[in-house]
Image (cartoon, rainbow, N blue to C red):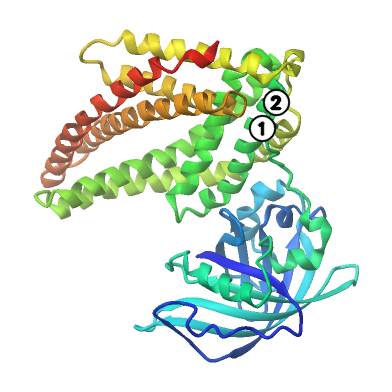
Amino acid sequence: MRERELKMMVPDTLELPDLHDAVAGASLGDVEERVIDDTYFDTADLRLARWGSTLRYRTGDGWTVKIPRSSKGTVLDREEVAIAGEPGSLPVRALNLVSSLTRGVEVEEVAQVHTRRLVRRWHSVDGALVAELADDTVRGSRPDGEAVSFREIEVELAADADGRLLDEIVERLTAAKRRAERPVPKVVRVLGPAALQPPDVDVVPVPSKPTARQVVQAAFSSSVARLLLQLPAARLGTDPEGVHQARVAARRMRSDLKTFEPLLDAEWSAGLGAELKWLIDELGAVRDADVLGTTLRDVVDRHPTIDPDAADRVLHELRLQHRRARRRLLRHLNDERAMQLLDQLVEASADPATRPRTSRPARDVMPKLVRKRWKRLDSAINALGRHPAPEDLHAVRILAKRVRYAAEAVAPAAGKPAKRFAADAAGIQDALGELNDAAVSGAWLTECAERLDGPAAFAAGRMTELILAEAGTQNRRWRAAHRSMTKRTAWFS
């Protein structure tokens, strides 16, 4: 379940303003009182808290893991996962979900939190929950016995509610001379300053005139943080974006290793790149099945002439493949090899093995690295015939993706020209991606049809025809993006 909430500290004596009409089209219910007892678990160095994640047992409710999605401004946005289990025995599933953040370090009890909650809920005219207002009086204790108490106002939106609804509530509360603060979980306030320290991977903004090393470190740390935060969603499997974003982060790092190759220790870079490829391949098997499933379901939905029962037999074959790929992925994510790789990546984000020349200004070093990648892409495109083979277009797409990642990595030093160049490369990548997805879908459907008979085989053939025909419209898009890129190379010099 997605959790989006606003939190703010308030004095014990504060009287809340009238909020009955704060949410348009919704009515505010009566106050309900609830007493909540939570026990929180973390590593000794509070790795989960520093990432904005929590693992807790709530009396009467069971275990919950919360993983941050993105916290912008004053809104805390997290994925909330309920897990069955008894108190005092940490569920293996919960530990696995946060393993990319704890990275093999033992989890132990770190705090107990007692909350007296006064809650009111806004419901729409049809009775659907829109938002919840909780006025919490909190008492917490750490393992050393130190006690903490405070009062907190929490406003949480329903899963499908419009995020803009918080604006009016914030305005009313601001009128009461309170302001929203940095969104942190209650246990972080209980644990104190140590829980507010940066996570293991600290993505530090690039200065206005960075060195090449600062750009390299910023690129790595951004991708490592993205990977660590997306792996829990990839494990969970309820949203295909988790696997996709984790794979993108790993691919970007591997591409950056290639782009920055002249600036990095060769042995270090090669070893890290090989391990990243292993992880990318494992994520890729699941992601490819996700993409294929989306493509096939979309073509079936848009073409009612395809026999739905026959199409479902085709999709059943894909579901079996997806299930096998997910089992394999989860097995490998639990391997010691995966934990060692994550440790290597965290170390790389803090101290990449760069060569002495990275002490030079990035503006003098970085554009040349992108130019090298651009020349390969430009030459490959110019070598294509009028009717290029799918495998040649796929090779061009890979080159475009590498150019895009390279330009985005050096953008902190090169500025807007690099960003525009990257946007054009993304245009090529996206258009050719659709062509490649169509080719992959067609090949899979052809192979699948050989295992099927009658209507199911016919449905697979019909789906292949439709997918390949619709993909042909992408040729103009990527060629236009290439022409635009040829006019944007002045920033290389």
Q: Give residue 243's position: percent from left, percent from top.
A: 48, 44
Q: What is the distance, in whole Å, between disc 1 and disc 2 at their CAs?
A: 10 Å
Image height of 38 relative to 489, above or below? below
Q: Residue at x 65, y 81 (%)?
A: 135
Who's the residue at 34% across and 24% down the image?
Answer: 481
Answer above or below: position of 424 versus 356: below
Name which residue lies at 50% across and 89% down. Answer: 29
Secondary structure type for disc 1: helix
Q: Nearer the viewer, residue 318 or 5?
A: 5
Report the side of 198 relative to 469 (left or right). Answer: right
Circle 2 crowding by C-alpha within 10 Å: few under 14, some 14–19, many from 20:
some
- Give the residue at mark 1: 218
SS state under label 2: loop
Which kind of residue does numbered mark 2 sit on?
Pro
For residue 238, side relative to residue 171 (left or right): left
For residue 278, what is the image quadrant? top right
Which is more toward the observer, 170 or 111?
170
Query: Which of the image's four quarters has the C terminus?
Result: top right
Callouts 1 and 2 close, C-beta under 8 Å = yes
Query: In the rendering, at what x and y percent does residue 461 appear?
Result: 15, 37
Occupied quadrant, residue 68? bottom right
Left-right relation of 111 to 237? right
At 72% across and 42% down in the image, what residue appears? 202
Q: Which mark is residue 210?
A: 2
> What amino acid is found at the position of numbered circle 1 in the picture?
Ala
Question: Total label count?
Answer: 2
Residue 64 in the image, given as x and y percentages of width and height: 61, 67
**Crowding near the residue tagged with mark 1, few <14, some 14–19, many ≥20 C-alpha atoms within 10 Å:** many
Residue 145: x %, y % from top left: 90, 72
- Mark earlier in primary sequence (1, 2): 2
